[in-house]
Each structure stands twice: as C-alpha cells, then as structure tokens.
Amino acid sequence: MPSGYDCDAIEKKWQRRWDEHRTFAVTEDPTRPKYYCLEMYPYPSGKIHMGHVRNYSIGDVVARYFTMRGFNVLHPMGWDAFGFPAENAAFEHGVHPATWTKDNIAYMRAQLRRMGFSYDWEREVTCCEPDYYRWNQWFFLKMLERGLAYRKKAPVNWCERCQSVLSNEQAEGGVCWRHTDTPVIQKELEQWFLKITAYAEELLRDLERLTGWPERVRVMQRNWIGKSVGAEAEFPLEAGGAIRIFTTRPDTLYGATFMVLAPEHPLALSLSAGTPEQASVASFVERMRRAERAVRVDATTEKEGVFTGAYALNPLTRERIPIWVANFILMEYGTGAIMAVPAHDQRDFEMARKYGLPIRVVIHPTGEPLPEGDCLEAAYEGDGQMVNSGAFSGMAGREGILAVGDFLEEQGIGKRAVNYRIRDWLISRQRYWGTPIPVIYCEVCGVVPVPERDLPVILPQDVAITLMGGSPLARVERFVQVACPACGRPARRETDTMDTFVDSSWYFLRFTSPHEETRPLDPAKVQAWMPVDQYIGGIEHAVLHLLYARFFTKVCRDLGLSPAAEPFTNLLTQGMVCKESQRCPAHGYRLPGEVDKAGRCRECQQPVEVGRTEKMSKSKKNVVDPDDLLAEYGADTIRLFSLFAAPPEKDLEWSDEGVQGSFRFLQRVWRLVEERAELIRGVRGLPWPAEEAEDAVRALRRATHQAISKVSRDLEDSFHFNTALAALMELQTALTRFQELLPAGPPQDDIGASSGRVLAFAEGVLALVTMLAPFAPHMSEELWEMLGEPESVFRQRWPAADPVLILEDNLEVVVQVNGKVRARLHVPRGIPEERLRSLALEEPRLRVWLEGRAIRKVVVVPEKLVNIVVAA
C-alpha cells in the first residue's frame, strides 16, 4: 500500500469529521435550487448486502455531485421496519419482533455509516415507531371520512392451521408456505380496503407526465391499471334476475353461446341449488377454492368447467344459453362473469370444444370468410366484418362496437362503459407486526373510527408470537376490550394490522418534515422539497410500491398537504448483483472458503462445478459480505467497483479481480497526489505564463478539460458512472506520464520555464481529485486536505470545462470538386481562409480532377470545407 494510504484510518477520520460538522444535514434554502435524491429504504433484515451497496452508492454519487453543483441536496435514510419476516424471526429465535427489528437497524445503520454515504441522519425515520405509524392511522381516518377506506367481504388465501390470511407468495403451489401439507383455500372475510380505483384514470393519465421513468416501468403500470373501453350488458336469468357482464367486444354479442361464472361468484352455488347439478357444482367450487389462482388463469392451463343447470337469455338474440362455472375466470377481474364467444376468444373456444358447446362465427376477417364454427381450428380474435349479427351484419367491427353500445343503451339493457383491471387495495393483515387499524366495533354504533385525539393506537409489546390461531392481537384482552368512543358501551378494537406497503407509500413525504408532531407533514416543507428529483431502486417494485406511492401522493394533494401530484420526477431501476455459484455433487452450494485452490470441495474432495451466474443469494451461497471487503479494501474501493463494473441499469457480475483493479486505481491516484502535493501547493494562485504553451502542456490541458466534459455529461445526463470513471482513469494515466516533464524538487519562488507545466499538472490533479470525490469520498477528502485546501472537497464547486481547451489543435477539412469529396486535409485550428484555399488547390490528390479544367470559383467554409467548382 502506498505510503500514508491507510484506508481504514482515513475513512474513519472523515466519517467522524462529517458527523462533527453536520456536513450532510440540510434545511430549506430558497436561495439555492433544491435537489431531492432518494434510494428505496431498506427492510432491516440484519445485514446489508452487495445489492444495497450498489443501490446506495448510485444514490450517493448523485447526491454528492449535485451538492458540488451548488444544489441544496436532501438525501435521507430510514427503515421499512414492519412486516411478517420479523414475526418469523421472533418465532424461530425466541426474540420479540421489536427487539429483532431494532437490533438489525442498529447493525445496518452502522454498516451504512461505515460505507460513508452522505445521508442526513437527523431525518431518519423508522416505520415501526409510534411517531411514524400514528400518521398511517391518521391517513386511514381521513380516507375513511372521504369514502376512500371501506370494509367488505373479499376472498383471501386462508390456511386453516395458521388460522390466517396468506399472501400469494406464501400460498405458492396451493399449500401453506409453513405447513406444506395443508392446502390453502379461498375464504371470504371482512377486509379493509383503500379505494385506489377512485384515482385509476388519473394514475393512468399521469403516466404520460413521467418522462423521467423507464418506459418498461410505465408499461407495467399501464398494464396493471388495465383500462378497457367497451360495454356492459345485462343477461336476463331464466328464473329471474340478471347477470351483468363487461366486454371490450360488444360487436361479438351475437356470438355469445354460453356464460361462465367465476367459482367465487355469488351465483355460482345459488343457481344450481335444487338441481341435479348442485353436488357437482359445489364440489368444483370447493376444489377451485384450493387451487392456485395464478395457475388457474395461466394460458396453458387446461380449461375446466361445470354446468350449473341454469340458463340465461342472450339480450340481443333472446337465445336460451347455459350458464357454467369455470376455472379460468376470477372474481376480481371484471364482474366475475363473462359472455362466452368461443369463435372469437381462445379460452372460450377451448372450453366449448372440450364440452361440446356451440361455436358461432360473427366476425369475418375482411375478404376472408371463416369456416363454420365446428370447423374452426382456433378462435379468430381479430377485427373484421360483422356477420350473423342481425341488423348489424355487414358493419366493420370497429363501427359495430360503437353501434351495439348505442343500441344497448337505447334498449335499456346495457351501456357503454370503461373498466379497469386494477382493484382496490386490500390492506388488512391478520398479523401482529404492523400498524393497528384505528377502528372500534360497537354492537350499538357499528364501526366507529378512533378519535384523532386518541392516536396513536399503540401496538402492545406483550404479545405471544405463534404464527397460528389468527392475529396475535386478538388474544391481548387489554388491547381488544375498549369503550366505544361514541356511546361508552363495551366494544372491541380491530385486531387486523395494515399492509406494510402503507408504510412505504408516503415515507418520502415524511422525510421533508420528520419531526413534525401536530400533523403528518408540514405543507411548507413538502412544497420546498417535493417531488423527489431522483428515485433509485429495484425493478421488482415497479408496480405495487410505485403505484401505491403515487396514490398516496395524490391523496396528500387532495388533503392540502402537498402540491405534488406525482412523487418521483425521475426513476432509475438498477440491475442486480450477480455471481457464479459453486456446487459440490454431494454437498450442494459451496462458499469460497469451502473450496480448495484445486477447485475441490474441502469436505469430500469432489470437483466443484461452477454453476450459472445468478443473483447473489444466501441460498446459493454466492454472497459476498461487504464487511469482509471493508476490512480488506475499504469503503471507497467497494463503491468504486460497484459503480465501474456495469451501467447502473444493467446487472453487475461480481469479480474479485475487478475489486482488486479498483483498489489499484485508487492506489495510483494516491501515489500521484502524495508524491507531488508539495509541488502543487507551491504554485496555487500563480498566474498562467503569458507565452504560448508548449505542445505537451496544451495536450494535458486538453485531456483535463475533455475529462471534465465527459464526466459531467455522464453524471448529468445518463448516470453512466462506468464511463465517467473510465474517463477519470484516462486522466490519471495522462497525469502520471506527464510527471516526467516536471521539476524533480519542490518549486522555488520563480519556477521559470516549468511554470506552465506545473500549473497544467496542478490543474489536472485538482480536477481529478474533485471529480473522483463523489465516487471515492474519503480518499478524495484526504487528498484535498493534502493539497492544502482547508474546506471539505464537497464545498468545492464542480469544475467547468473550457470549450476552447477541449478542442484538438488540428482539425480535418473536407475538399470537394464539384460537390464530391476528393480529399481531406489536416490543418491547424484557426488557419486563415486564404492559406486553406491555397493548400486545397496545391493538394496532389486533386490533380486528376483539376488538370485541363477551368476553375470557376472556390468556396471556403472556414475550418470545415473547401469546394472547388470547375468547368465540365
């Protein structure tokens, strides 16, 4: 290691100094432009991993760069601290979720501080603390007042042994994640919802404003919201009543030959009651309750159904059509019922073929009549001309969609309609470690909101975590039993807690005023900071988290708390950190220390196979511990490698050699500055010599200013940190080579002919250290101090490239004859027009085009073009 480069001591020194000087603490400052930089805050799982390091290093470079650009930068950090994993840990290790969570936060906070990230730790928020979750409850009450929070029955994944609702992830394969011998069933429970659908159209429309988001993410959100334009129609039931359906293809109504209900539909069982089909329908519905929903709707899943014994009437043809229940219809999509048009929908076609149901063609591709339904090989789902459709036959399909919609409205049997795939947000969780839902149930008054004055409803600590028997809160009598706020009679509290997505749906707003005690947000401070200028996080949160955050932001706007309609102006979704896995045939995945130098398992000496490159995962035993790297290389090296190895939006493939290469680069920079610090300090403030600079000096200054331009552009426009670092490496190489032209000893008062060289070298070194600072802040601070600067390098303004110095000394000029390129000249910049004209006319390569021809004129475009016009 170079003399004096003790990365551990240097990093601790500067982290301590940053804390002492509150370097990254910010307040509102209307005299400077604001910049709000935010990375998705972490779940406190116990230790940071390399994915965290990469994500937070990206954000830190952005924050530090804009600080040096003169912006007032808000860069906060907090903890997504509620969630089911804490209950798992409590159950498995005998530790209370609060203890487990807070211990993990303390450890991870220390790790993040050790990495030197520029967070304003004075704004830290922890979502499991009452001073945060009381405002979750406040928001809930405000939404309840506005009709945006409501309670209804809904089908949920249910485990009888756990006596609890499971997420889709906990119910994979149709069995409970914990009790793999227990099937998950669909059960209807009273649940709390937030009415995100009230904002569906605005959420969809405002995606057009988010031009700073990846198009991939915007497409995913559009698809999730899933706006469909079509018509609703009432299919009368033969026994009375009707089934309402929504269709995007009202032009195919004449082709509806049967109806299909979701197994969860309220009519699925009642229609078959008292019929011979009652038992088979009940059995089918029960089996579907246990089936995995994702499998049911998969296009490759075989279509299954059962006849209910009941019939409806097609409202246009008055034809009597059977009503079935099928696996591929879900209650949460549309109305939970469809008209089946097997000639023009592939799912319906497959079901009709399987059960011998009628297939009627009502749309012909233009100029290509389809065969009769029984002869179709697959459904035709495209547009075309309506046929077999009464008065609408002959119409183009698009025209027919509008015409049939109008007819439904005229006849009072339907209407044009817009439907959305998005459903209201179910926030009820039958779990302990979350925000208590602030309502009370009274037998006289019904559902009673907890008065705002009684917030927060504190989550009790003396709770036994069993992961079975429903919500642990339901067993805490002193929590459950309460007086009704309205009438004073005995009542009971809600024992469900909120989905943890609620915590993360507004934390970015709370960072603007984290110590506000009278309301969730200070509107003046929200206005000063919002929206977030740059948000950084994984693509896995592209839909739900970002959608809920957008929803909460709009609610806050409507509550008068925020002027922002959207939370995040720009979004960067960084790639994963990946590493090759090593597997032993006998012992599975092996850690590096479990494999010897010959590539054999230390336990059984069998050759270890290098598996495919995969996301770092404890289960794959391919993780790299940041603590080990910190001890060996220091924080700056880890940060540098995570930023240099790949563009931020791409996956980063781990490389031990890459880490070592980053460390060697930092060593070279250290050595360069350490050896010449006294020389550079000696010329600070000296004027540039009046005489013309020599070629080597001009070349170095050009390299310096080209690097400034390149790095600034890469940071400003695209966050291509890898190419910015490559430019810094090139500058370091140029400076190292230039040292041969410098005086051997320290400068004297008059350095004579060497002054231009030393000043150019000093300019390059200062630019290098300044631009390296966002990437390797600790070492840059130390070098900046070594160069005689009293203030932090982050109080230094970002260098500006001189557009004149960037230009090459020589340039290329095109020479044309009658408009066709015949030669190219390399000439000095600033060459006079007459001299350029003479050089073009004297160019030997033009003789064949000029000999024997009269030159009519010569057009000179300075420093770009000479066009010689000759007679034909």
Image (tube, rainbow, N blue to C red):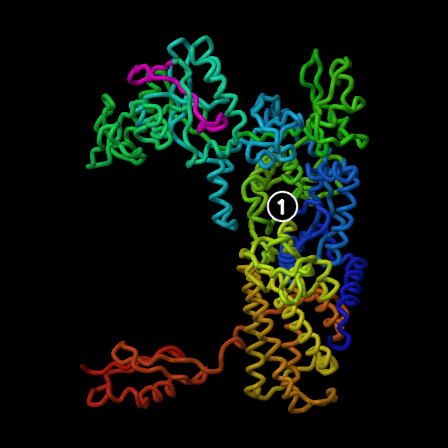
* Residue type, label 1: Met
Report the span colored magenta.
311-333
Question: Residue under circle 1?
Answer: 530
Instruction: Count neighbours of disc 1 (C-alpha within 10 A) and say few if under 14, some if 14 to 19, many if 20 or more.
Output: many
Q: In the displayed structure, would residue 523 be above or below residue 860?
A: above
Q: In the displayed structure, does residue 801 sit left or right of residue 412?
A: right
Q: Please name the residue shown 79% across and 37% down the image.
A: 96
Name the residue nearer the viewer: 221 or 377: 377
Q: Is residue 317 magenta?
A: yes
Q: How many marks?
A: 1
Q: Position of residue 459 (x, y in %)?
A: 76, 31
Classify residue 292 as left or right of residue 596: left
| x and y, in percent, of residue 143 in the image | 63, 28
- Residue 275 sits above or below residue 841 on the image: above
Q: Nearer the viewer, residue 636 or 526?
A: 636
Residue 381 position by quadrant = top left
Residue 81 within the segment the image draws in magenta? no
Front residue (pair 306, 442): 306
Query: Residue 760: x and y, percent?
Result: 62, 81
Secondary structure at numbered mark 1: loop
On the rendered image, what quadrant is the N terminus found in?
Answer: bottom right
Q: Residue at x 69, y 19 (%)?
A: 448
- Residue at 58% over, 28% down: 184
- Can residue 67 be seen in the rendering of this structure? no
Query: In the displayed structure, would residue 813 be above or below residue 532?
Result: below
Q: Nearer the viewer, residue 177 or 747?
A: 177
> Percent from the top left, x then y, of residue 809?
49, 82
> For the C terminus, which image quadrant?
bottom left
Image quadrant in which you'd find residue 314: top left
